[in-house]
Every structure is written in structure tokens, then in C-alpha cells.
Amino acid sequence: MEQRRAETIADEIEELILSDAFADGDRLDEATLAERFGVSRTPVREAIQRLSLTGLVDLRPRRGAFVRQPGPVELLEMFEVMAEIEAVCARLAAARIEDDALAGLAAANAACAAAVEAGDADGYYRANEGFHLRLYAESGNRFLEGEAQRLHRRLKPYRRLQLRLRGRMAQSLAEHREIIAALEAGDAACAATATRDHVAVQGEKFRRLMSTRATAAE
């Protein structure tokens, strides 16, 4: 229960940061947040720790926790690297994935489809995360999996935010199906390309993401 509460509070603080209720460099005061959410300081402290793993919060010894908002150039660079890392995961997975793991990816995507049908962006985000974590694992490379997980955590708030773009959930679902089809066929090049295109936020998609951030701030 306490862990779930911390997770909920982390999501709410994340939402406040992305909507610019907290500006870059603002200090997050545990006592104030505990009062705001009607909880003790313990789940707030845990929530802040969780957010520090995404990079949205900077923990400074003996000073506290401070909001850190990446600029558009840094955000684009991170998504570019994420797209390449996931493409490598998919390329390796195409040669190594087993039938039961393919079934697991299909099940994760079925959960994504149910969320699209329900119009549930948060539900889609959770199922989508499961899909990508499975893909990293199926690369068969533990070091690569760990690096992918670390950057995935860093980009979590923005991957969640881009799902609010009109039509993005349905588009993402279709892209998952392309990835699964390439993996089933053992086509490493196609799997890598489909995954890279799925994760990348260049061009119009990136402009729409930044526009969504600006709209949330307003």
C-alpha cells in the first residue's frame, strides 16, 4: 500500500513538473508536498527518489531535491540515442527470441490494444512499458538491457506525455505489430528499422511533443 501511494504521488509530482507548476531549479520541499497530498513525509520522500531516477529531479547532498527540466535539444538527443539503443535490442532479438517470449510480447501488445479501445492513456503507458522492457530482455545482452532500462527511466515522463497526442496510441499499437511481425520472421534489419522509427521523435512528432508540453504549461 505504501509503495503504491509513493508511486501515485510520483506520478502527480511528475504531472506538476511537466505542466510547469514547478519551474526548472525549484526546490521540492517534502513537508509542503506531504501536506499537499495529505500523507506523511515517507511516501513523498520515496516518490522524489523515484523521480530522481528519471532525471526530472536532481538530489543534492545536504541541500534537497530540485526540479530539472531538459531543454528541447537535450530531449531530442536523448530520444535519438534511445531509438538507436532499442533498434540494436530488436536486431539482436530477431535472432535470439523464442516462441514463448514472442507470445509475451503479443500479450503485452494485446493489453495496449485494450487500453486504446478504452481511451486509457495511462493504461496504455503501463502496457507499452512492459512491451519495451520485454524487448530489451530478448536482446540476450545483459549490458545492453541495463543501458536501455536506464535511458528508458530517464525518458519515462516524456514517453508518457507523447501518448496524449491525438492518434498516437493507435499509431504506436500499429508500430508494435510491425516490430512483432519482423521478430516472428527473424528479419533483423526490418525489426531494427521498425523499432527505431517507433521510438524516434524527430520532425513533426517532436514538434507536436514540444507543443503538448507548452500547452500543459499554459
Image (cartoon, rainbow, N blue to C red):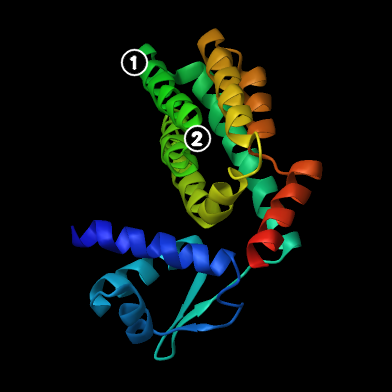
Amino acid tagged 2: Gly
- The total of numbered circles placed on residues is 2
Q: Position of residue 167 (x, y in %)?
A: 65, 33
Q: Quadrant of residue 91?
A: top right
Which residue bears the numbered disc 1?
Answer: 100
In the rendered structure, the answer to whether residue 187 lies left or right of residue 56 reads right
Determine if residue 55 is in view.
Answer: no
| Residue placed furthest toward the top | 185
Q: Amino acid at mark 1?
A: Asp
- Please determine whether, in this image, residue 52 is positioned above or below residue 123: below
Marks 1 and 2 in Cβ contact (< 8 Å): no
Q: Position of residue 100 (x, y in %)?
A: 34, 15
Q: Nearer the viewer, residue 195 or 189?
A: 195
Q: Residue placed at 27% from the left, 61% from the top?
A: 5
- Regarding residue 197, the answer to whether it shows in the image is yes
The quarter in which the C terminus is drawn is bottom right
Classify residue 19 by image quadrant.
Answer: bottom right
Say which element carries label 1: helix
Instruction: Indicate the position of residue 127 as horizontal and vertical percent values.
Output: 42, 35
Query: In which image quadrant can residue 197 be found?
Result: top right
Q: Badge 1: how crowded within 10 Å, few (<14), some, or many (20+)?
A: few
Q: Secondary structure at mark 2?
A: loop
Left or right: 35 in relation to 74: left
Q: Residue at x 37, y 22 (%)?
A: 104
Name the one closer to the observer, 139 or 128.
128
Q: Residue at x 35, y 82 (%)?
A: 30
Question: Where is 2 relative to 68, above or below?
Answer: above
Of 25 and 101, nearer the camera is: 25
- The N terminus: image quadrant: bottom left
List the residue tagged with mark 2. 119
Locate residue 81, reporting x and y percent.
66, 47
